[in-house]
Amino acid sequence: MNHLNWKGVMPAITTCFDERLSVDYGFVAGHVSWLIASGCTGIVTPGSLGEGATLSCEEKLALWRTCVEAAAERAPVVAAISSLSTEEAIRLAKGAADQGCRGLMVLPPYVYQGDWRETRAHVSAIMRATGLPCMLYNNPVAYGTDFLPEQIAALAGEHQTFEAVKESSADVRRVTAIRALAGERLAIFVGVDDAIVEGIAMGAVGWVAGLANAFPRESVELFEAAARGESARAFELYRWFLPLLRMDTVPKFVQLIKLAQQEVNRGSARVRPPRLDLSGAELEQALDTIRVALATRPQL
């Protein structure tokens, strides 16, 4: 089994669509290259931010192939594996491996919120499906399934391919709880943008970031300052960044982050239904937040 160096800023990338709402693979390739050149250590796709639930299996395979080719061995591509059924999840995991992905981000099943026995069987089947190293995605707010620290530790004892956790409960105490049970066995990533400095202070070693799609250099600088213990610099950047980072924590985070990309000329705000583009007062408020941030953007 090949291990993956789980650390640093790994953006959960958005999926850019053209005017017909088809995946714009050309843009995706350029976006991946830009993010890596900006200091990001990996690419995660297509998770919730990548509108994975709206993509067909064929589109996901093409997306992974595009990202792997664009990364060109400079950084790993981690495939987000989510589906309604365990069978399809296994098929996607194997497809991601075939396309050259170097890791998997394993999600609980969509829609059906099983008990621990069922959820354990589902994620275990995915972790066994390939030899790729795996990150477990814990997001009880979005998915209704909460992987408790003791359950995470149990999975780590069962699966050598299980190497990292994306912790998105928004409770930084979970970082210390997982570390207390698993030690250094698992790399812990923060998955909620506006908890990154707190998460690093508790021992997280990575960040699956959303706003990095529009502000990768700022994201990397913030992460590295916090990881080095440079509190003054970290909080200076954090205070500037927080109004943007909070866009990652609300139901319309996809629309908001894509709008931020559009405002910095790094993508389009287009989303696939059932999502719709922002409008009215909601749009104006978001634009005000982004434009204030751009006007006060720190020197790096």
Image (cartoon, rainbow, N blue to C red):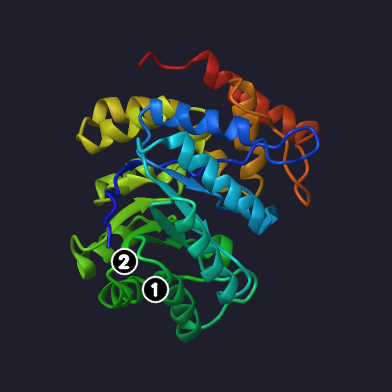
Question: For this rendering, which residue is in front, 132 or 151?
Answer: 132
- How packed mark 2 is, by other alpha carbons closer than 10 Å (few <14, some 14-19, many 20 or more), is many
> Which x, y percent locates residue 18?
74, 33
Residue at 40 percent across and 67 percent down: it is: 130
Whether residue 218 is visible, yes or no, is: no
Decide: is 147 above or below 39. Answer: below
For marks 1 and 2, the one nearer the N-term is 1
Q: Is residue 171 left or right of residue 272?
A: left
Q: Which residue is mark 1?
A: 128
Question: With 2 as the anchor, is 295 left or right in this view?
Answer: right
Q: Helix, strand or loop at disc 2? A: loop
Compare residues 46 and 94 and report the one nearer the observer.
Answer: 94
Residue 161 is marked as 2
Quarter containing the N terminus: bottom left
Residue in front for this viewpoint, 214 or 298: 214
Residue 213 spot, x, y in % from top left = 52, 33
Mark 1: few, some, or many residues within 10 Å (few <14, many ≥20)?
some
As drawn, 82 above or below 189? below
Label 1 and label 2: CA atoms lie apart by 8 Å
> Which quarter of the picture shows residue 36?
top left
Tell me, yes or no, whether the two marked residues, 1 and 2, touch with CB atoms within 8 Å.
Answer: yes
Determine the residue located farthest toward the bottom in the rendered image.
117
The percent position of residue 141, horizontal first and vertical second, equals 54, 61
Q: Amino acid at mark 1?
A: Arg
Q: Residue furthest front?
A: 98
Q: Is residue 197 left or right of residue 44?
A: left
